[in-house]
């Protein structure tokens, strides 16, 4: 028989939040993280982004539960229920929780097999209760490992370990991942990536997330700051030059010096 885990349970459910309103999305993420029963690996605003995240999950990036709002702007006539409905016959689908302000969809939602129904305004007590119920239904698979990153090279899929990544770049509505193996396209936004691997990455610019372990040089030229992220120093180096925004330049410098020695500081 499954037991309900305590808040300190070593296994945390992996959650995706689908909510188009930024304040509500961030608040729900905070409540989920504060429970210590789950970690948010993605927080997206549209059904399109949610479908991409589920597609990656089907490829091996484990996802346990999706918290989805019903009314999502910019999704034409589609609703959060359509996301649930599309996976009804998928035996590998994650658990679903409807997180909405609308009571009237509860009967249909439970008929589609949703695992819980959260009504706004959310509270910590209710979110904790929901996650304890989900824990009772799903225990970790012994084969479950850390998330890998699924990228694209033309028509091929490329599977990357997080430790291989130098940096993520967003440009022209596309996201790229820079690695020793090359640069590849991703289907997720920087916000989703940061939610998944945020503690292992450093935001140095609104368009850049970098793996601080690969920062090899910091360059200041007047009011501009750049870092080199990659392997090696000098002519033989391989990697990418990354701009650092002015408001992040000093925090980035302080972060690098905090874990280094050898420089005399005034």
Image (cartoon, rainbow, N blue to C red):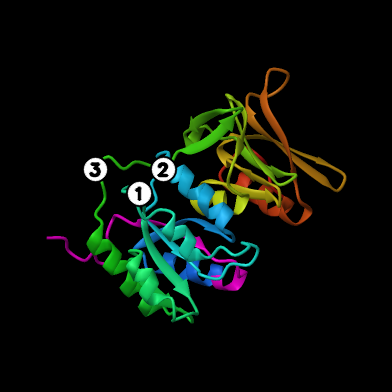
**Disc 3 versus disc 2: distance between alpha carbons?**
18 Å
99 displayed left or right of 211: left
Q: Can residue 247 be seen at all in this image of the molecule?
A: yes
Image quadrant occupied by the N terminus: bottom left
Q: Which residue is mark 1?
A: 90
44 displayed left or right of 55: right
Q: Is residue 78 above or below residue 202?
A: below
Dot 3, how many residues are within 10 Å of its Cα: few (below 14), some (14-19), or many (20+)? Answer: few
**Disc 1 versus disc 3: distance between alpha carbons?**
21 Å
Residue depicted at 29% across the width and 64% down the height: 134
**Disc 1 versus disc 2: distance between alpha carbons?**
10 Å
**Which of label 1 and label 3 is nearer to you?**
1
Tell whether label 3 touches label 1 (CB within 8 Å). Answer: no
Q: Is residue 163 above or below residue 17?
A: above
Picture quarter containing residue 60? top left
226 displayed left or right of 79: right
**Which of label 1 and label 2 is nearer to you?**
1
**Which of label 3 and label 2 is nearer to you?**
2
- Indicate the secondary structure of the residue bearing disc 2: helix
Tell whether label 2 touches label 1 (CB within 8 Å). Answer: yes
Q: Is residue 121 above or below residue 33?
A: below
Q: Overall secondary structure of the magenta stretch? A: loop
Sequence-first disc among 1 and 2: 2
Which numbered tag is attached to residue 142? 3
Q: Which residue is mark 2?
A: 58
Residue depicted at 63% across the width and 62% down the height: 76
Position of residue 46 measured from the top left corner of the image (x, y, whole percent): 59, 59
Position of residue 109 measured from the top left corner of the image (x, y, whole percent): 39, 69
Query: What segment is highlighted magenta in the picture?
Result: 1-24
- Indicate the secondary structure of the residue bearing disc 3: loop
250 displayed left or right of 42: right
Position of residue 150 measured from the top left corner of the image (x, y, whole percent): 50, 37
């Amino acid at each position: 028989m499954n037991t309900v885990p305590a808040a300190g349970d070593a296994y945390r459910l992996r959650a995706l939040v689908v909510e188009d309103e930024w304040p509500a999305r961030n608040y729900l993420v905070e409540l989920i993280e504060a429970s210590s029963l789950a970690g948010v690996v993605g927080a997206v605003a549209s059904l399109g982004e949610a479908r991409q995240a589920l597609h990656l999950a089907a490829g091996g990036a484990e996802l346990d539960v999706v918290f989805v709002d019903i009314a999502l702007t910019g999704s034409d006539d589609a609703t959060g229920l359509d996301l649930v409905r599309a996976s009804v016959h998928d035996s590998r689908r994650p658990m679903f929780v409807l997180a909405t302000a609308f009571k009237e969809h509860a009967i249909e939602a439970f008929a589609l097999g949703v695992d819980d129904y959260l009504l706004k305004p959310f509270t910590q007590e209710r979110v904790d209760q929901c996650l304890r119920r989900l824990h009772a239904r799903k225990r970790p698979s012994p084969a479950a490992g850390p998330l890998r990153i699924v990228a694209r090279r033309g028509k091929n899929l490329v599977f990357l370990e997080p430790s291989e990544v130098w940096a993520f770049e967003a440009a022209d509505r596309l996201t790229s991942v820079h690695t020793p193996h090359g640069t590849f396209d991703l289907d997720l936004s920087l916000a989703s990536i940061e939610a998944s691997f945020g503690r292992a990455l450093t935001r140095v610019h609104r368009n850049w997330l970098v793996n601080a372990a690969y920062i090899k040089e910091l360059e200041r030229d007047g009011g501009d700051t750049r870092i080199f992220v990659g392997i090696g120093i000098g002519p033989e180096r391989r990697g990418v030059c990354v701009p650092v925004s002015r408001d992040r330049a000093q925090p980035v410098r302080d972060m690098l010096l905090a874990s280094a020695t050898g420089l005399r500081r005034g």
